Image (spheres, helix red, strand yellow):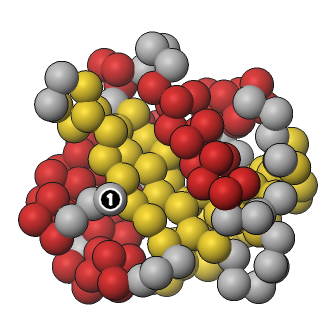
Amino acid sequence: MVTAAECTVLRELAGGIWRAHYRSIISMAQIEYMLRERYGDEPLARVLAAADRWLELLRVAGEPVGYCGSELDGGDRDGFKIGQLYVTEAHRGRGLGRFMLRHLEARAASLGRRTVFLQVNKRNDSAVTFYRRAGYSIREAAVFEIGQGFVMDDFVMDKRL
């Protein structure tokens, strides 16, 4: 699990991944807004203090190359949400994303959850393909207002375990 001391590492990793990957999908203004909202001191402190949320770094030879986040879905006793699953561009295509995805699915199963779901930007073709290959299906298309006039235009995808 990410510790308070590792938040700076997580923040830098997320910033690098997001700015490189999402710049062709959403505006830089939205990227910066979302990074502040998810990886600022207060949001990270809330996640670290929660018993039903997890953030984890993935390291290869000691170097942080990815991270994942998950949580219990409070509105659904059967649901488990993958909120984040990211690997640096230089480390994609090596099975690390699948490794983290299987890890999160195993956590969900160990907690008695039968449905794993996530949101993915509709224009994030590589991620949609990745999740489809892992057995996820599009449950719905949805637009979520996230503040300051920004929206997330996403697919909600899920998989029964």
The residue that appears at 45% across and 26% down in the rendered structure is 96
Q: How many marks?
A: 1
| Residue underneath mark 1 | 1
The residue that appears at 25% across and 26% down in the rendered structure is 60
Provide the secondary structure element on which disc 1 rests. Answer: loop
Q: Quadrant of residue 135?
A: top right
Q: Is residue 124 above or below residue 82?
A: above
Q: Is residue 29 visible?
A: no
Point out residue 6 in the picture as x, y percentages from the top left corner: 15, 59
The residue that appears at 48% across and 72% down in the rendered structure is 53
Q: Is residue 22 above or below residue 132?
A: below
Relative to 3, 86 lies left or right: right
Q: Is residue 55 above or below residue 132?
A: below
Q: Is residue 147 above or below residue 105?
A: below
Relative to 114, 143 lies left or right: left
Count neighbours of disc 1 (C-alpha within 10 A) and say few if under 14, some if 14 to 19, many if 20 or more. Answer: few
In this view, the residue in front, 72 or 91, is 72
Point out residue 62 in the picture as x, y percentages from the top left corner: 15, 31
Point out residue 108 in the picture as x, y percentages from the top left corner: 67, 57
Q: Quadrant of residue 36?
A: bottom left
Point out residue 27 in the picture as x, y percentages from the top left corner: 42, 54
The residue that appears at 24% across and 75% down in the rendered structure is 40
Q: Amino acid at mark 1?
A: Met
In this view, the residue in front, 155 or 30, is 155
Q: Is residue 157 visible?
A: yes
**Which quadrant, please, contains the N terminus?**
bottom left
Q: Most extreme residue toward the top, as rendered?
A: 94
